[in-house]
Amino acid sequence: MKKLQRIAVFTSGGDAPGMNAAIRAVTRAAINNGLEVLGICQGYKGMIEDNFIPLNSQHVSGIIQKGGTILQTARSKEFREYEGREKAYRNLREHQVDAVVVIGGDGSFSGANEMSAEFDIPFVGIPGTIDNDLYGTDYTIGFDTALNTVVEAVDKIRDTASSHNRIFFVEVMGREAGFVAINSGIACGAEVIMIPEEANQIDKARSFLKERARNNKSSIILVAEGIEEGGAYEVAEILTPEFPQFEIRVSILGHIQRGGSPSAKDRVIASRMGAAAVEALMDQQKSIMIGLVNDEIVHVPLNKAIKMHKPVSKSLIQLAESIATFGPPK
Ligand code: F6P
């Protein structure tokens, strides 16, 4: 295998706080190991459109505290076609790129897996998504910051809920997974937490509301956007008519969960993973994702990270129910 001289790094999929810390660590670790670094702007779209920029130590100074990604990200339909991937590959070769670091989620890793199977170019993935839904790692970059954003928002909602004795259905992100919901729900003391991994979530909320009827107190019901019933508005629409005695409101937190200055934890995780990605490429690794398991850096085959499902821990679900206002559902 040709000696590594130049690597490219890019961000792809939904952005996440901490991606800049990862870009910075990849760039600094590579340069400090004698490598050159190119940034690819706007994900696979930029790879196809030849949107490459040089990255040196100065380019990545002063970004560790910034949310979002200085390289931007975009979704690319063209990349789904072989011709698009071939164009991307030709651009990588034109720029004499020897290997690529992709910072993103499972969709971004699928693209990298496909490309490295079709062309001779090694990819290493860094898990960057607020969803924390990637198999093989305890943490994805952005998850911790998103949790803190949700907790801060729900604490504010609880102020007005208690002033008006209202019930709030608060919807959080997470795609088809409940990691954001279960963790932020425990952290903000939500009375009910509805997650896609568990069935009959409406009945859980319904039995809570029946119990609550006895003590007219405000409540927060946290709803993961991926539950089978739809989302917070759908849940409220079903339950409001059944409880006319309650004042019910809905709050969709939305994309504030994707922004903000990354937490210290996300900055450290991103820095560790960025440096580990460069080390892996220098060790001639390819088609792996850098993970963090029990606080140790691990290498996870990319196709496993993509295909395997990461379950929400049962113990966390049981904990949430065991310390809920009325205890586990009857
Ligand atoms: O994957 C991150 C995420 O924020 C999900 O939690 C959410 O469902 C999705 O991205 C939203 O995608 P978009 O930013 O394209 O609307």
Image (tube, rainbow, N blue to C red):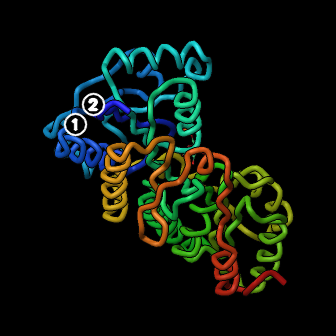
Question: On residue 229, which mark appears?
Answer: none
In the image, residue 273 sits, relative to residue 245, either above or below, namely above
In the orientation shown, which residue stands out farthest toward the front? 1
Identify the residue shown where x is 39% and y is 50%: 17
Taking the spot 65% from the left edge, 66% from the top edge, the residue there is: 312
Quarter holding the N terminus is top left
Ligand 1 location (quadrant): top right
Comes first in the chain, label 2 or label 1: 2
Judge left or right: residue 58 versus residue 78: left
319 or 117, which lies in front? 117
Q: In the image, is 328 to the left or to the right of 85? A: right
- Establish if 195 lies above or below 13: below
Kindly check if marks 2 and 1 are in contact, taking CB atoms under 8 A apart as contact: yes
Residue placed at 35% from the left, 53% from the top? Answer: 276
Quadrant of the frame with the C terminus: bottom right
In front of the other: 295 or 178: 295
Per the image, the residue denoted by label 2 is 6
Name the element at disc 2: strand
Which residue occupies the extreme left position in the image?
58
